[in-house]
Amino acid sequence: MSEPASLLMIEFLRWVASRPRTYAEAMDAWRSSCPRDPVWDDAITEGLIQIAGGAADGQSEVALTARGRALLEASYKHKPVRR
């Protein structure tokens, strides 16, 4: 990614990483027709998530790629300090 990840992207990556997620579940929770909220498309384009399994019934697994895990881990290291 050429610019820092948005908070929405970090939230999406945390959501994916928190437990096994299916493609159908991810689409239900994160698909958007709003051009200002393309987190799903951006995550795929940037290589942050992958869809494994290829099941036609929406049961394919959505998981973080190594790049997605690295971005998520970096977000934990750069948490703002509350004062």
Image (cartoon, grey):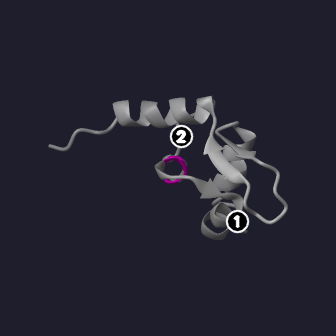
On the rendered structure, is 53 left or right of 43? right
Mark 1 neighbour class, 10 Å CA radius: few under 14, some 14 to 19, many 20 or more: some
Instruction: State which quadrant residue 76 falls in.
Output: top left
| Image position of 45 with respect to 35: above or below | above
| Image position of 2 with respect to 80: above or below | above
Prevailing SS of the magenta stretch: helix
Query: In the image, which is nearer the foreground, mark 1 or mark 2?
Result: 1
Q: Which residue is mark 1?
A: 24
Which quarter of the rendered picture does the C terminus lie within?
Answer: top left
- What residue range appears in magenta? 13-17
Helix, strand or loop status at disc 2: loop
Residue under the image location 72 percent in, 52 percent down: 41
Residue 5: assigned label:
2
Q: Position of residue 5 (x, y in %)?
A: 53, 40
What's the residue type where badge 2 is placed? Ala
Question: Looking at this view, is 49 or 35 the one in front?
Answer: 49
Residue under the image location 63 percent in, 35 percent down: 65
Residue under the image location 63 percent in, 60 percent down: 37
Q: Position of residue 63 (x, y in %)?
A: 62, 45
Question: Looking at this view, is 71 or 35 the one in front?
Answer: 71
Whichever of labels 1 and 2 marks the residue nearer the N terminus, that label is 2
Which quarter of the rendered picture does the N terminus lie within?
Answer: top right
Helix, strand or loop status at disc 1: helix
The residue furthest left is 83
Q: Position of residue 60 (x, y in %)?
A: 73, 55
